[in-house]
Every structure is written in structure tokens, then in C-alpha cells.
Image (cartoon, grey):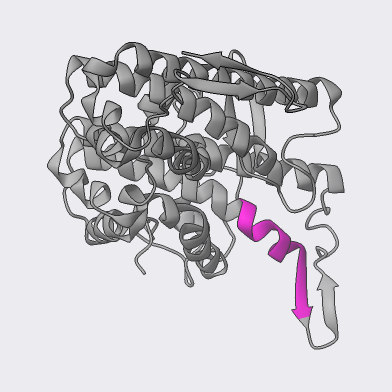
Amino acid sequence: MDLVFKVTAGSPATPPQVGDTNFQNHYSGVNTSMAWAELTPAIRQATEKFVLPFIGTELYTDLAAKYQAGTSLSAQQAQTLEYLQDCIAFYTIYHILPEKNTVLASMGVIQNTPTEGSGQPSSQWAWKSKRWSALENGDTFLDRLLNYLEAQVKASVVYFDLWKNSTAYTKKVSDFFRRTDELDEYLNIQGSRRSFLGLVNFLRQVEQDVIYPLLCTEQYDALKATTLTTQQKSLLAKVRLIVANLGLAEAIPHHRLAIDGDGFRVVSQTDQFDDRRNQTNNVHESAILALLERAERKGRAALDALKVFLEANEADYPLWANSTCREKPTPKGHTIVASADKVGGVGIF
């Protein structure tokens, strides 16, 4: 696969070093005298592992080919490339650090140590801190990339149909939430598409398990249309409130969340040594539990309110009113209700 990094120096060393490439423009903490060939496998692996599942191969392949060929880029393509290079650079460092700490030899796994006078190995704390920082920065720049891509799709920039039409985009939506900003109206996920993607499977679950049995096929499908009446928009807003909150409540046990300001973000689960967020921090853990309880309570209250709303406005929603999903009360007229001991009873006429 083509990379989004290459040798850019006019007179590179033989063999090329990192300092001869554009990689140092996106990650300044790497030794420029390091052999370029030592880093390129990690770049490819980090790209495939951390980035392609979010942006798809179509957009990446086209943009990387353009970069390697030196093709002139539009302003939007150039900005996308810069965000892409930033996030891949940090994910590469996160990915490669454990491999550079030890080496596999015929005698087994041995630790790399510098020759005398060439440097000192870092402390365990410094090593872990550097790796954690690389992961956080990789997440941050990937979010910026994804948010930028969504903005281009929303603006109907044709080039970004490469992403819009890819499975990385089309398979990661729910019936009632297709974009990050739609969910951000109900849950303050701080515009993070990575958070949206972390929640979307749980949103779909609530849509199918809770909303579909309530509305039935005709009304449910009508809400998925791109053009809605005023009444349908009102119903959709109520449905989204339920799905967002119950979906969040279902998702929280499966994710690491970072409570930031008045919102939250889904963050990478682990750096493979420590949890990304310290769950033994009682303040943070309590905030997450409170978020879960509030989401569950708000979602259930919204569901009850929706049932009342539908009954009160049945004329506006005939697809639901005439469906088999509508809960019709059992008639009580002209019946006799027997007492528990079957001795007496009450007749209602």
C-alpha cells in the first residue's frame, strides 16, 4: 500500500533516514537519524489497524496515491492529508514503542540497551507517558480528520463521495442517526465521530428492540425518509431522544468514557498496560455511573411520554394508529368481574 509519508530531502542519506522524510513534520519526537526502513512497517500497520476502519480504503488509497505522485491537491484534499498524516504519525509511535524496547533474537527476547555514551534508557514512567501521549494525540487528530470529512460530505464536496459511499461510512450509521451532529444534539459528545461510532451499534439495538415494536413497520419506515412532514419531524425528535439516552445507557458498560466539561467522549479502551482512564478514580467513576443512571431514567421517561403523545395525536399518525402495534385497551363494558373467592361479583353495563 502507498503511505502518506515519503523521502522529501533533495540529497537523502544512504540508506534514507527519518530526517530525510516528511514524517518529522508530523511527529517531532523521533530521532531523525533513525533508519527510515525501521519505521515504515509500523506506519503501514498503524494505518491499517487504527485509521482505515474509520475512513475506508477508497479515500485513503486515492489520496495516498496522489501524494506519492506529487499530484496537485485541492485545499480540502490538502487539509485532509495533513490531518491524516498527523493521526497516523502518532498512532505509529504508539504502535512501535513496545517493539523498539525489546528485540527477538535466537536466544529469546532481549532488551535493547544503548552503547556506552550514546544515551540512557528512559524510565518506565517516561516510556509509558510517551506512549499514552501518542495514543491520546492519535485519537485527537483522527477525530479532527473525521469531523472534517463529515463537514465535506455535508457541504456536498464531490471528491469526498469516496468516503461517503464506502462501507466505513454507510455501515456505521443507525436508522435515525446518520451523522455525528445529529447525535450531538441529544448527547454532548463534543462533536466526536469516534464517540458516535462507539455508540452507533447500541443505538441500532434500541431502535430495533424498543422503537420498532412500538411504531410498527409503516410508521417506523416513514421516519427514515429524507423528507418529513412537520408532524413526522416532531415524532422523530421524540424517538431520537429515547434512542440516544437508552443507547448511551446500553453502551456505557462496554466503553471507557472521559467526562470533559459538560459533555463526554468515548476514548480508546487501553494502552495495553493501564486503562486509558483510571476507573479507580472514585470521582470519575461516580460521574460515569451518574451519567448511566441519568440516561436510563431520561430515556424511560421519554418512552412513556411518547406513548402518551401518540395516543393524544393519533389523527396525525394514521400509520401507527392503524397498525397492529398500537396498544388498544381491552373494553370493560358489559362485563362481570368476579371476586377472588368466586362468591360475588360486579357487573358493568
Query: Can residue 297 be seen at all in this image of the molecule?
Result: yes
Residue 3 horizontal side relative to residue 114, left or right:
left
x, y percentage for residue 224? 26, 36
- Residue extending furthest front? 343
x, y percentage for residue 140? 52, 35
Q: Residue at x 25, y 22 (%)?
A: 317
x, y percentage for residue 89? 51, 49
> In this orientation, which residue lies closer to the viewer: 65 or 285?
285
Q: Residue at x 79, y 51 (%)?
A: 273
What range of the chain is rendered magenta? 94-104
Residue 40 horizontal side relative to residue 221, left or right:
right
Q: Is residue 26 above or below residue 265?
A: below
Residue 69 horizontal side relative to residue 273, left or right:
left
Residue 276: quarter of image: top right
Q: Looking at the image, how many numbered discs can be counted on the residues?
A: 0
- The N terminus, quarter of image: bottom left
Q: Is residue 265 above or below residue 168?
A: above
Residue 118: quarter of image: bottom right
- Residue extending furthest bottom? 106
Residue 270 horizontal side relative to residue 185, left or right:
right
Q: Residue at x 59, y 24 (%)?
A: 264
x, y percentage for residue 263? 57, 18
> In this orientation, which residue lies closer to the viewer: 140 or 214?
214
Q: Is residue 103 magenta?
A: yes
Residue 299: quarter of image: top right
Q: Residue at x 26, y 19 (%)?
A: 233
Query: Can residue 187 be seen at all in this image of the molecule?
Result: no
How would you classify the magenta stretch by its main secondary structure? Answer: helix
